[in-house]
Image (cartoon, coloured by chain):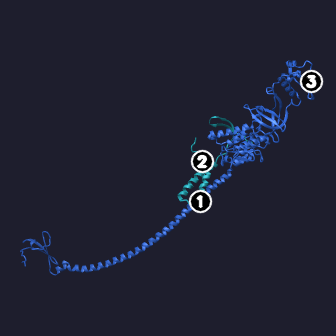
Chain colours: A cyan, B blue
Amino acid sequence: MNPNPQPTFSSSANALDTIIDRFKSSDLTLEEALQLFEEGVGHLKVCQSHLGVAKGKVEELVQTLQEEGEVITEAFGDDEEE
Amino acid sequence: MSPRNPKSKNSQTDGSQQQLDLDAASAVVEMFLGDVLAEEVNQNNRLVPDIWSVSALTAYFQSVIENDPVLGMPVVVEGELSNVKRSSRGHVYFTLKDGKASINGILWASTVSRLKFKLEDGMAVYLTGKIEIYAPSGNYSIVGKKLEPVGVGALQLAFEQIKEKLEAEGLFLDIHKKPISEFPRRIGIITSRTGAVIHDMLRVIRQKNPGVDILILPVAVQGESAFAEIATAIKRLNQIHRMNPRYKIDTLILARGGGSFEDLFCFSEEAVVRAVFESDIPIVTGIGHEPDYGLADAAADYSAATPTAAADWAVPDLRLLMREHHYRGEILLELMNDELMAAEYELDQKATRFTELVTLVLENESRSLLRTREKLTDAIARKLEQSEQRMARQSGELSALSPLDTMKRGYAITTSLKDNKVIRSVAAVSTGDTITVRLEDGTLHASVSEIELKPSI
């Protein structure tokens, strides 16, 4: 459906590591460095957005409707809820 | 099936009666062969007819067996399977033998379907069943109700068989293992709804990473239907994962608390192992305790020792990720800063060198300029001096040439009153014209009374 989904945490984190390696290992021109830095900041933001999510849901699958894998769930009663 | 005498169910044989005495035998014959057959019984009250029909003899034989205190009850026979053949309807025919004898055996399809393991030639088994005669062919065989392997348990054998089969198909190879998501957003959990396992797992996941969504699909994890439920659950979560983009599942955990080999066997059933293998979602198993290793574990992408270990493995520590994330940010900033500092330093170096060069050039230039200026000043001074001298000379010469000096010596300048022009020739005036004669100390106005031409020479 979405042709360009948000990059995953892992892909962004890996891309960042690659950028950091390039910074460390190769002789960059200032332009290249600035461009890489800008890319790196973009990846950092993606990672940040992944890390900063709210508390996840705990659901129990009740039913699957055949079309489009539509699901019906209900909150899972966790007795040990704080 | 062998034909049975309808009266046979009425027969009752005393268990202590090991040998048939004649009367009893006669009674039995009468009882079993019925009226028609009874006619064939010898008139002399002998217990057997002179001439038997084949079916009567067969029926008699059948009845003897059925009424035998030993053979009438199910017997357990130990032997080796051979000639195992499966019919199109699912019945299994085989020969059970030991070193000296063999006997035919049959397992009806309904019995076969309850067997967890597969019957193979050469297998040593305990067969429980009753001997029956198949009248049309005159063969007798044991119709088995139960069959168990000798030495190992039936489930153990089934385990080994499934393992061997799926191993040969490559289901347990490492090349098929999918990487477990490093940062899952949603975890699917297939386990029992009841018991501590699910709560322990939820606690571990919450502690490590509260942001993860969890989708639980409760199943029975023991009993006859468990394996089918588990296999279906795996397929169902995969279907949801494939078809519903809002319900992507990054990792699937298959879990069960500890139990006996029999309790855990459902996780080694072929259907479950295949479902694990075919899952698009990477699967982490946590089944039983440390030494338990089922076939689902072998086919899974990662197998943890316990359910909580599986939960722990499936979910990254958020605090650790945060720390790494901040570290990356700092490193990136630091590296960029280094890069800028290096560029600044380089620029500084260049600027310094440039300034030095420019200063040097300017100094040289200004020195030569100074020299030029000095030369120029000198030249101008000289020129001025020369000019002054010349002017002084010229002014002396000029004053000598001034008409005032000439007039002092008695010369006059005559001009016409008409046009105030200097008269240089007598031809410029006529008699009677008024002229002005300018002397050194005044002016005379006079009129021309006579014109005399200078005689030509």
- Secondary structure at badge 1 equals helix
Q: Which percent across, then down, holds residue B37?
A: 86, 19
Q: Nearer the viewer, residue B158 or B81?
A: B81
Query: Comparing marks 1 and 2, which lies closer to the viewer?
Result: 1
Q: Amino acid at mark 1?
A: Ser
Q: Which residue is mark 3?
A: B24
Q: Quadrant of residue B264?
A: top right
Q: Earlier in the sequence, mark 1 or mark 2?
A: 2
Q: Quadrant of the C terminus of chain B?
A: bottom left
Question: Is there any visible trace of residue B353 in the rendered image?
Answer: yes
Residue A25 badge: 1
Crowdedness of circle 3 by 10 Å Cα count: few (<14), some, many (20+)?
A: few
Q: Amino acid at mark 3?
A: Ala
Q: Amino acid at mark 2?
A: Pro
Q: Which percent across, then down, holds residue B410?
A: 14, 80
Q: Nearer the viewer, residue B93 or A53?
A: B93
Q: CA distance from mark 1 to mark 2?
A: 26 Å
- On screen, residue B411 versus residue B366, left or right, reads left
Q: Which percent across, then down, holds residue A44?
A: 60, 52
Q: CA distance from mark 3 to mark 1?
A: 105 Å
- Secondary structure at badge 3 equals helix
Q: Quadrant of residue B30?
A: top right
